[in-house]
Amino acid sequence: MPPFAPLVFSGVQPTGNLHLGNYLGAIKRFVQLQATHNCIYCVVDLHAITVPQKPAELTAHIREVTAAFIACGIDPKAHIIFNQSQVSAHAELAFILNCTARLGWLNRMTQFKDKAGKDRENASVGLYTYPVLMAADILVYRATHVPVGEDQKQHLELSRDIAQKFNLDFAPTIAEKGFGEAFFPLPEPLIQGPATRVMSLREGTKKMSKSDASDNSRINLSDNADVIAQKFRRARTDADVLPTEVAGLAGRPEADNLVGIYAALQDTDKANVLRQFGNANFATFKAALVDLSVARLGPIGHEMQKLQADPGYIDSVLKDGAGRARAIANANLDAVKDIVGLLR
Ligand code: AMP
Ligand code: TRP
């Protein structure tokens, strides 16, 4: 495999209710990676419409995710922030990769099964091919590293399978056109840290999710200090004190989740949190967790509100980012067309 220039790509769907799981599992990592990598961060609006969206809400949510990116510390000048639908190369490459991906591969995707539910016949075709569009998002930039939460692991593996099959299927023309042994890198998932799967505050075995009917199940990035305090105080726990070692969290999903959240917010690990709070009861620990959360999330929520009051600015960030993204994506898409044998 030839060396590919390191490039980070990731996406977040504009489906409302951005929460602590999105922040700790993904966006916080996006911010950190800016120091060491070129980064492209995308508001994946086409992915959002794989399930029904109200048009006006979708527009507002695209701006909301963009505001969150900026408020959390992504620099739209040094890196790229844009919304997917402004760069048509994503959809074009997705079609080409639809012809590389196999039905059998897509049939194994657990997220489709979860989202389609019992009434699978009535799910959109877009929901079924969602992971191929995701592969196209990444591969159209020939990105090498993809920071995501745990729930995206299977989709990343599929992206790698698609990249590898394309490289193999077209190996002769890839070499002939001067791209060596492989045109696409095999993108590496970056799923790291103590909060790659933040759980619901109401049920420690269920993922924190934008679509949970109970708003108390999640901390939204837009929640104010009082709401954050109230939700953590009401968060489900067990009756024991906190253990002194990480092994003691086994079989205690709620405790494990809150300790993981604290660790991620404090940029440390669970062992260190338990050195501070081992033997503490939940009332004590939750009070500290509220203080830390409010200190970390308060300024983000505030900044998001300010940014969202100026949609003109947000739209200009997306337009500028889309222009720069398009230049990279179109060049790679042209190369793909040449490799596949399509005239342009
Ligand atoms: P989505 O809202 O589905 O577009 O997710 C955006 C990013 O947040 C993806 O990288 C997800 O893996 C991540 N994410 C979503 N929910 C959680 C969660 N509960 N814990 C950790 N990461 C999450
Ligand atoms: N499927 C991802 C999610 O729901 C969002 C996404 C779309 C994505 N395209 C991507 C993430 C490309 C990483 C890279 O969270």
Image: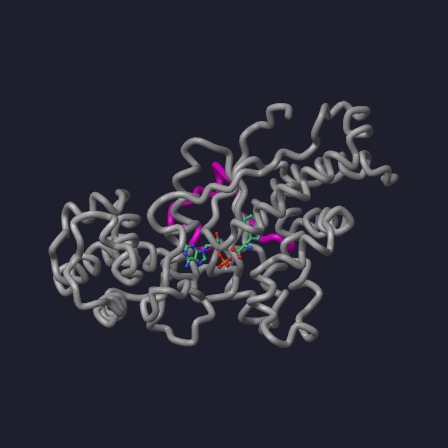
Give left or right: position of 67 versus 223.
right
Question: How many labels, in total?
Answer: 0
Q: Residue 237: where, in percent of width, then height?
A: 24, 67
Q: Residue 318, can we see it? A: no
The quadrant where residue 282 appears? bottom left
Q: Nearer the viewer, residue 98 or 313?
A: 98
Q: Residue 98: where, in percent of width, then height?
A: 74, 51
The quadrant where residue 233 appears? bottom left
Q: Residue 113: where, in percent of width, then height?
A: 59, 65
Q: Residue at x 43, y 37 (%)?
A: 33
The quarter in which the N terminus is drawn is top right
Q: Is residue 210 above or below residue 337?
A: below
Q: Which residues are magenta?
A: 66-85
Q: Residue 119: where, in percent of width, then height?
A: 64, 76
Q: Nearer the viewer, residue 322 or 15?
A: 15
Q: Residue 189, can we see it? A: yes
Q: Nearer the viewer, residue 85 or 305?
A: 85
- Asked if residue 54 is among those painted magenta in the image, a careful observer would answer no
The quadrant where residue 171 appears? top right
Q: Residue at x 28, y 50 (%)?
A: 265
